[in-house]
Image (cartoon, helix red, strand yellow):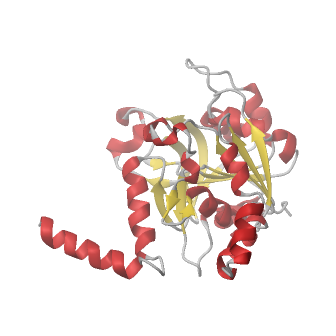
């Protein structure tokens, strides 16, 4: 019987240059979707999958992420004195969601380097990886993407990652898997190529930022040679893992938003805004009116 997935790593050390100047002082992971930061939604996804310890790998200038999951005495005291019990309860809930552990990535060494930085906390246990700017939003009555991957791992004992099919013209934006066929919805991965040209892509199955790994991935990442820009690619470690211990891939539930992209962030803001209990109806009426005005 495979171990249960109780730990998750969220790489959140990127500079967020696509959102400058906003990200000069505000981490993109804390950008709000109405009133909930992107990172909170990702942490909640992990918690719904039964994860208890969350390792956030952050860089210099991102202490606001640590502060968000910490106590805020002034705010909590103000809410208590003002009788805003529901808001106070929500803040208390957030800081007790999971054990949040922050690790500093001291250099921009790539995604593989960020995952490797979590090794002292994760140790020899299997773990999930959720990218800090990728949203996969599931309905309340369906498993989260991370929960689905965890179940696959616990059943097979093989590291399992999420994939989605993308248009040929978009394969150069993602890590793309090569595989040896599909059985019962699971692909046996033979290698992973980082952002290939369309004519060189081994498939159109892309990685949307959700992974569950056996701890063996750390040894593979430690042996990866940095690329031409000095970064350790997670995809290189995944290829090595696939060829030795094995690696599976499967499609996962949920709507996916690339919240690290301006348009993807706007899409998420609109769709989640339409579902928000306070502003959803008003936003829907506004969008209908706006559509009629602009034709």
Residue 67, compared with residue 60, is above or below; it is: below
Tell me if 21 is positioned left or right of 189 in this view.
left
Find residue 261 and report its horizontal and vertical position in percent: 43, 47
Quarter of the figure with residue 85? bottom right
* Total count of labels: 0
- Residue nearest the viewer, comparing 275 with 60: 60
Q: Measuring from the top left, give residue 243's x and y in whole percent.
A: 68, 37
* Rendered residue at 60%/50% (across/down): 132
Residue at (44% x, 41% y) in the render:
19
Q: Does the image show residue 49?
A: no
Q: Is residue 286 left or right of residue 101?
A: left
- Pick the front one: 44 or 205: 44
Can see residue 19?
yes
Q: Quadrant of the C terminus?
A: bottom left
The image quadrant that residue 291 belongs to is: bottom left
Question: Residue drawn 48% across and 60% down?
Answer: 256
Residue at 67%, 78% in the rendered image: 82
> Residue reaching furthest top?
228
Residue 66 left/right relative to 181: right
Query: How far from the left and from the top, in percent, is residue 240?
Result: 69, 34
Q: Is residue 194 above or below residue 139?
A: above
User: Horizontal and vertical percent for residue 118?
Assistant: 78, 41
Question: Based on the displayed image, in which of its 4 quarters is residue 238 positioned?
Answer: top right
State which quarter of the image contains the N terminus: bottom right
Looking at the picture, does residue 86 appear above or below residue 126? below
For this rendering, which residue is in front, 60 or 220? 60
From this viewpoint, which residue is outermost toward the front? 81
Left or right, 158 with reference to 253: right
């Amino acid at each position: 019987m495979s171990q249960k997935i109780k730990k998750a790593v969220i790489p959140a050390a990127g500079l967020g240059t696509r959102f400058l100047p906003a990200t000069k002082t505000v981490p993109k992971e804390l950008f709000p979707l109405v009133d909930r930061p992107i990172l909170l939604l990702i942490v909640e996804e992990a918690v719904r999958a039964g994860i208890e310890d969350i390792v956030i790998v952050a860089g210099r200038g991102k202490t606001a992420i640590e502060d968000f999951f910490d106590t805020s005495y002034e705010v909590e005291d103000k809410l208590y004195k003002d009788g805003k019990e529901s808001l106070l309860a929500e803040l208390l809930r957030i800081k007790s969601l999971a054990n949040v552990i922050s690790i500093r990535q001291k250099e921009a060494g790539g995604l593989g380097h960020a995952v490797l930085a979590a090794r002292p906390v994760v140790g020899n246990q299997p773990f999930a990886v959720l990218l800090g700017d990728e949203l996969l939003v599931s309905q309340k009555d369906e498993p989260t993407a991370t929960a689905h991957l965890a179940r696959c791992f616990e059943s097979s004992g093989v590291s399992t990652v999420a994939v989605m099919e993308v248009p040929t013209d978009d394969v150069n934006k993602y890590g793309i898997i090569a595989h040896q066929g599909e059985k019962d919805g699971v692909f046996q991965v033979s290698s992973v190529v980082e952002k290939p040209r369309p004519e060189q892509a081994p498939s159109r199955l892309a990685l949307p930022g959700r992974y569950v790994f056996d701890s063996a991935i750390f040894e593979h990442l430690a042996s990866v040679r940095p690329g031409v820009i000095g970064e350790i690619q997670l995809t290189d470690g995944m290829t090595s893992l696939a060829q030795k211990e094995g690696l599976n891939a499967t499609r996962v539930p949920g709507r996916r938003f690339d919240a690290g992209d301006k348009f993807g962030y706007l899409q998420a803001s609109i769709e989640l805004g339409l579902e928000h209990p306070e502003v959803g109806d008003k936003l829907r009426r506004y969008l209908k009116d706006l559509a009629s005005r602009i034709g």
